[in-house]
Amino acid sequence: MSAWHRITALARKDAAELLRNPGATVPAFLMVLGALFPGFLVVIGAPMIAGRSLEESGDFAEEAAQAIASMPELAGLSGNALIQAFLFHQFSLFLLLVPVVAASALATHAVIGEKQSKALEPLLATPISTTELLAAKTLTPFVFALGLTWLAAGLYIAGIVIAGEPGVWRTVLGPRTFIMFMVVGPLVELVALQVSVIASSRANDPRSAQQLTSLLILPITAAFVAQLMGTFVIAAPGLLLGAAALAALNVALLAIGVRVFARESILTRWR
Amino acid sequence: MAADLLAADRLTRAFGDRVAVRDLSLSVQAGEIVALLGPNGAGKTTTMRMLAGLILPDAGTITVAGTVVSRDTANQARRSIGLLTETPGLWERLTVRANLLTYARLHELDNPDSQVTRVLDLVGLADRAGDIAGKLSKGLKQRAAIARALIHRPPVVLLDEPTSGLDPASARHVRDLIGELRRDRRAVLVSTHNLSEAEQLADRIAVLKTELLAFDTPAALRTRGDGIEVSIEFEDGSRHLATVRELAEVADLVHTLVRDGRRVVRVTPDRRSLEDVYLSLVGAEP
């Protein structure tokens, strides 16, 4: 229990520091709004502005009907509701940017903040092990970013309940959404966290470290664009495949992270 | 004889091809203050880090309060060590109390709140406990950092440049605190560039330049090499210069001169300063 005691002691301290650091928290909160906006703009805003429903415009109708084969939760819907549900599922992938950006913003500040205030050496002089230190440095950003991801998911669903056609929101509560926010989201976030922590060991300011982490946005954006271009939705099996790849990547990053967080490395190699 | 609370035996540590510390042996007893002197790049920080269990030596052994430091025992050894790093390294967005409370928890102390209060009283920061650490003056930050190093009542205290950059009043306050550590029977190792501070505080001084060049009391160090020059003035106005190895020999010298009928009016030992000794040891031009 003493290891957990030390990890939580440091994680509590990190949480208190993050709450006093708008430079870390504001980008994370802005990302939540940024990730929610495009879906509602396309599905609700654009038809409202155009004065025609999605069904009337004829866009996406065929693709939405085809999507029922891979997403049984869409069955039972038709017309405008089916198209809305199809698009809301496509745009939900965008919400995976929240754990990436939030984790990156929070973790880089948590590690580089220690470097900038030269607080790592006295910390390393305590009985904390370097594995505990690594765990503590990722715990607070993990909890914060996961909370924001789930907040974004909650707001997304709430927005669909309020603005979507009746019945659309029920389709979003299916296994696909569960896998996305309960499995893929945390795994994506862990990758972002570990990359951020490793990058932070070599950088002297959070922005430089975040540049490397921002590369993680590319595969998510690519998957999102592929969905739009190919007019399909990555369904539950596809997400599970992605989750397996992310889990493997996390194991590899953990091995690197433990090596980077060795006491001697921190004191002699970190810049 | 008091036991060594901190002992280093033939420590060597290299980084790549560069040897930072070679064959260093020193010890600090309970209630003793040892000053570690050396020019920049002499290996003082590496030595401090090895003694604090932060990095391991390539060769040699370190014993801290009876524990031989190894990869397996380093965590245990660190429980017996309080380290003041060269910069205070406080979490500047948090209050002084929050800083110390985190360390009390990391050391798994009972009643962390009361331990924080105790150590704040010790360093005279009780009335500043609620201040944001980043807004404190340099002297107060240093006191907070000392409080952090002492929160777990370590028997061994390592202080790296404790008065560096402080105004005279703050530096004096810190020196007083270090003096209290001696009265508390802690073993204290102070790394410093300040020779007069070392002379004032330390029971023994270690001069390091990759290797240990000297390790002795300040008085003994001053008599190294050429000894003590003594100027003797006689009633007729003449002067005699003599060199003795230690001050006790001056009495014998005066006795011999008086027995020979010389009328001695003044004897002035021209003691070498610690600075002279230090500079000659490290091979630097004054």
Image: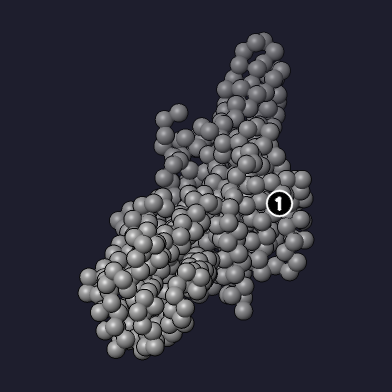
B280 w.r.t. B54: above or below? above
Say which amino acid is labelled 1: Leu
Mark 1, residues whose alpha carbon is within 10 Å: few (<14), some, or many (≥20)? many
Residue at image coords 30%, 62%: A215
Question: Is residue B187 among the parts visible in the rendering?
Answer: no
Q: Quadrant of the N terminus of chain B?
A: bottom right
Between A153 and A201, the one nearer to me in the picture: A153
Residue that sits furthest to the left in the current view: A230
Residue at image coords 76%, 48%: B126
x then y, percent, for residue A180: 40, 78
Secondary structure type for disc 1: helix
Give the letter of the chain under mark 1.
B
x then y, percent, for residue A31: 43, 59
Residue at image coords 71%, 49%: B130
Q: Quadrant of the C terminus of chain B?
A: top left
Between A174 and A46, the one nearer to me in the picture: A46
Between B88 and A78, the one nearer to me in the picture: A78
x then y, percent, for residue B284: 42, 34
Between B166 and B114, the one nearer to me in the picture: B114
A262 w.r.t. A183: above or below? above
Residue at image coords 53%, 39%: B193
Question: Is residue B268 among the parts visible in the rendering?
Answer: yes
A72 w.r.t. B273: above or below? below
Q: Quadrant of residue A127?
A: bottom right
**Picture mark count:** 1
Q: Badge 1 is on which residue? A: B181
A172 w.r.t. B177: above or below? below
x then y, percent, for residue A119: 53, 54
Residue that sits furthest to the top in the current view: B236
